[in-house]
Image (cartoon, rainbow, N blue to C red):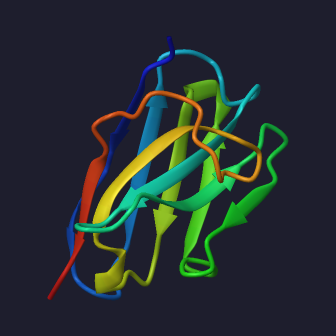
């Protein structure tokens, strides 16, 4: 079973930037759609951004224009560049294999990486 490990989270001030990474144990990014999700305290996990094997991307309205999803197939790594961060972006961020639109996660959830946006 493919293992996914998220990293890159941390504490950042509003308006700041972070880049999250999702490392896979196997070469899957050229085969499967992948997505980033997040879960804030007391809220359900939600889709942040998705990318298909062909490179088509899909973003939640709340992050459009601020976040960019990408992947490096050679490094088996997917990224989420987050700019202009807001306090409401505070959450644990997860990556997973997904349906092409990202609405459905298909794999096992990892530990996630905590992102905290606060002054």
Extreme-top residue of the structure:
1
- Seen from the viewer's position, the closer of residues 62 and 46 is 46
Where does the image place residue 59, in percent across and percent down from the top left? 65, 68
Q: Residue at x 30, y 65 (%)?
A: 91
Extreme-left residue of the structure:
119
Compared across the picture, whether 84 is left or right of 32 comes to left
Where does the image place residue 7, in percent across and percent down from the top left? 32, 44
Quadrant containing the C terminus is bottom left
Q: Residue at x 57, y 41 (%)?
A: 105
Compared across the picture, whether 23 is left or right of 61 comes to left
Q: Quadrant of residue 47?
A: bottom right
Compared across the picture, whether 55 is left or right of 26 comes to right
- Seen from the viewer's position, the closer of residues 29 and 89 is 89
Q: Is residue 27 above or below residue 23?
A: above
Extreme-right residue of the structure:
54
Q: Quadrant of residue 64?
A: bottom right
Compared across the picture, whether 53 is left or right of 96 comes to right
Q: How many numbered circles are shown?
A: 0
Q: Residue at x 50, y 11 (%)?
A: 1
Q: Is residue 48 above or below residue 93?
A: below
Q: Residue at x 78, y 37 (%)?
A: 53
Q: Is residue 41 above or below residue 24?
A: below
Q: Is residue 93 above or below residue 22?
A: below
Where does the image place residue 13, in percent across and percent down from the top left? 22, 83
């Amino acid at each position: 079973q493919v293992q996914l490990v998220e990293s890159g989270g941390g504490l950042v001030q509003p308006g700041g930037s972070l880049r999250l990474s999702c490392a896979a144990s196997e070469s899957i990014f050229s085969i499967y759609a992948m997505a980033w999700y997040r879960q804030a305290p007391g809220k359900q996990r939600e889709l942040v951004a998705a990318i298909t094997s062909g490179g088509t991307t899909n973003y939640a309205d709340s992050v459009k224009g601020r976040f960019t999803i990408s992947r490096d197939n050679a490094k088996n790594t997917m990224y989420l560049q987050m700019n202009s961060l807001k306090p409401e972006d505070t959450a644990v961020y997860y990556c997973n294999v997904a349906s092409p639109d990202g609405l459905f996660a298909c794999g096992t959830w990892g530990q996630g990486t905590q992102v905290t946006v606060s002054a």
